[in-house]
Image: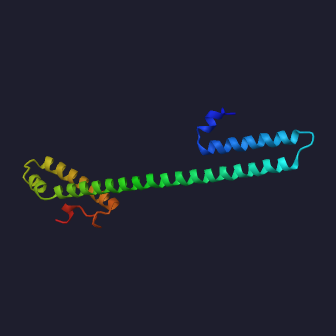
Amino acid sequence: MLPLVEILSYGVSGIALAMIFYSGVLLKQELDRPAPRPSARNLILIFMAFCIIVGGGVFAAESAKRRTENEAAASVQAQEHKATLSNIATLVSEIDANLGGKYQVAIDQIPDQNTKRQLIYFENELCRSVRDLKAVLMVNGDTRCRIEGE
């Protein structure tokens, strides 16, 4: 059995547990008497019922507190997740914007055809990744890569 001080460190629930245990000890002592007194036995049983009700109330209060804390934590996580998705969507849009325009002009000016083909290949791979990310993030409902529209 845990020491009384450790049980009481759990707060009201520890006190309720100690009271239930104490009423059980009182009831056993009363029933061990040669002639148990019905009035004392009934009083101990009433005290035990009171302790159980208090213990149940404490349990319900702690459960409600934990549920509220869990809901608050879930809400914070959902907000952080939404902010992260928004940041990712912004980055994907910036990548998409940089695929066209100046980048495309720079590729067109490369004289070496092998290098040009490699860059176009990587650009297409990046474009495919942009499409996939847009589909997951639902960026403006448009899943096309910028260079596909040109």
Instruction: In the displayed orientation, state which residue is furthest to the right.
Output: 34
Left or right: 39 in relation to 129: right
The N terminus lies in quadrant: top right
Q: Can residue 128 be seen in this view?
A: no
Q: Position of residue 4 (x, y in %)?
A: 66, 34
- Vertical comparison of 3 with 55: above or below: above
Q: Specify the quadrant of the image occupied by residue 97.
A: bottom left
Instruction: In the displayed orientation, state which residue is furthest to the top.
Output: 3
The C terminus lies in quadrant: bottom left
Q: Can residue 59 be seen in this view?
A: yes
Q: Where is residue 144 in the image (x, y as percent from the top left)?
A: 25, 64
Q: Where is residue 95 in the image (x, y as percent from the top left)?
A: 21, 54
| Front residue of 14 and 94 | 14
| Front residue of 93 and 105 | 93
| Front residue of 79 and 92 | 79
Q: Which residue is drawn at 88% across and 39% down?
A: 32
Left or right: 60 in relation to 143: right
Q: Which residue is drawn at 88% across and 46% down?
A: 37
Q: Which residue is drawn at 66% across and 32% down?
A: 3
Q: Where is residue 12 in the image (x, y as percent from the top left)?
A: 60, 45
Left or right: 127 in relation to 5: left
Q: Which residue is drawn at 37% across and 56% down?
A: 79
Figure label count: 0
